[in-house]
Image: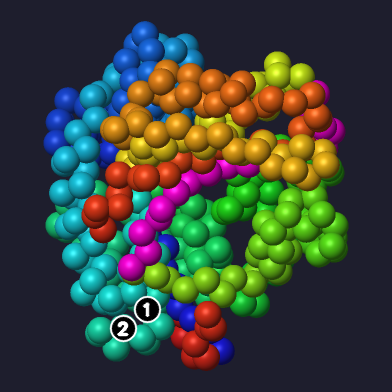
Amino acid sequence: MLRKIIHIDMDAFFASVEQRDFPELRGKAIAVGGDEKRGVLATASYEARKYGVGSAMSSVVAKRKCPHLIFVKPRFHVYKEVSDQIREIFLEYTDLVEPLSLDEAFLDVTINHKNIETATEIALEIKEKIKERTNLTASAGLSYNKFLAKIASDYNKPDGIYVITPKMAEKFIEKLPIKKFHGIGKVTAERMQRMGIHTGNDLKKMDLTKLVKEFGKSGKYYYNIVRGIDFRDVNPTRIRKSSGSETTFLEDLISINEMETALTPLIEDVWNWSLKTTTYGRTITIKIKYNDFTLSTKSKSASFSIKNRILFDQICYDLLTEGYTTDKPVRLLGVSISNLDNEDSYGKQLEIPFSDF
């Protein structure tokens, strides 16, 4: 007896809004954010993605991959207005709506306002209303928990819908590349691949003790999701207080140069989250765990949200230098942001048959 969870993800949201509002951009390779000389992309149109251009890519690299790429200045106030329109559609069906960013959200429709029996019917209606009211497309993933619904929404993009039922979940997860697992970031995925973990099936062969030893408390999460277990509720009141990325190294780091190199992808992870969610922090914290398991943290706060990538990077590297005050080898590094600029804005699974999904 299981829940009915929908994950709605707008297709190339920022870029699609620009192409909707400016007809001359339709059918063309565009990137939102950055410019030809510097900066990082927030997103790219599907026409640009055919050339390998994607979000969080430097504009210089993007231009090299796609010489005819058009750079568009982001209009976040417009994206927020459209996001609010879409949220109103969600609320027609359920109050259990958990936004993850401007362009995606979880919905728990197990019990819904319209007493519609199947989640598939609800998802199709939502997609149709989004198209009618905003002239944009969305993709939907449906399953019995958040992890699988999130994975499903990415499976049939753009303008797609995909259902992962309990009967198909095990084999689906076993075949899934580890880099496609929601909750396993780029750094962790690369580390797992070095350990010989390339698919869900590889991960499933790891016992719980080994995963916890290698990845700390996240190890239990990995152990569960590869078995299709995820009891997290859809939480409409959730306001995220911080965001971070950390990794434990296979071999201890012994020089500051090694640490700076290892810190770079963690900085990328956190910055990419800020770009994706348009949420920035006033406080940056660097976490250092030594090979004797002692812990050191160093933080710096600003009076404003840090939205400049160069400044963000510089603070991170400065904090690392300030925080590393010993010759002890380092086994873990982490980067996090807090005092987010979203703070002033907005258990158990129910037992309901899944056969009508």
Crowding at mark 1 (Cα within 10 Å: few <14, some 14-19, many 20+): many
Q: Quadrant of the N terminus?
A: bottom right
In this rendering, position of residue 284 left or right of residue 217:
left
Would residue 182 be found to the left or right of residue 24 on screen? right
Residue type at numbered disc 1 = Val
Q: Residue at x 66, y 62 (%)?
A: 221
Point 21% across, 43% down: residue = 79
Q: Is residue 187 left or right of residue 194?
A: left
Of 280 and 179, the residue lying toward us = 280
Asked whether the residues under the numbered discs 2 and 1 touch, taking CB atoms below 8 Å apart as contact, a structural biologist would say: yes
The answer to whether any part of residue 158 appears in the image is yes
**Separation of residues labelled 2 and 1 (CA atoms):** 5 Å
Rendered position, 206 above or below 15: below
Q: Main secondary structure of the magenta part?
A: strand
Total numbered circles? 2
Q: Is residue 196 magenta?
A: no
Residue in the foreground of this view, choosing between 7 and 101: 101
Seen from this angle, which residue lies furthest front?
325
Q: Amino acid at mark 2?
A: Asn
- The residue labelled by disc 2 is 112
Q: Which residue is mark 1?
A: 109
Residue 17 placed where, x, y %? 22, 40
Residue 159 image offset from top left, x and y in percent: 36, 53
Q: Any magenta on residue 247?
A: yes
Q: Position of residue 192 (x, y in %)?
A: 76, 44
- Quadrant for residue 261, please give it: top right
Residue under the image location 24 percent in, 49 percent down: 136
Secondary structure beneath disc 1? Answer: loop
State the image coordinates of residue 161 (x, y, percent, origin top left): 43, 61
- The magenta region covers 237-254
**Which residue is at a point 69% across and 59% down the rendered structure image?**
217
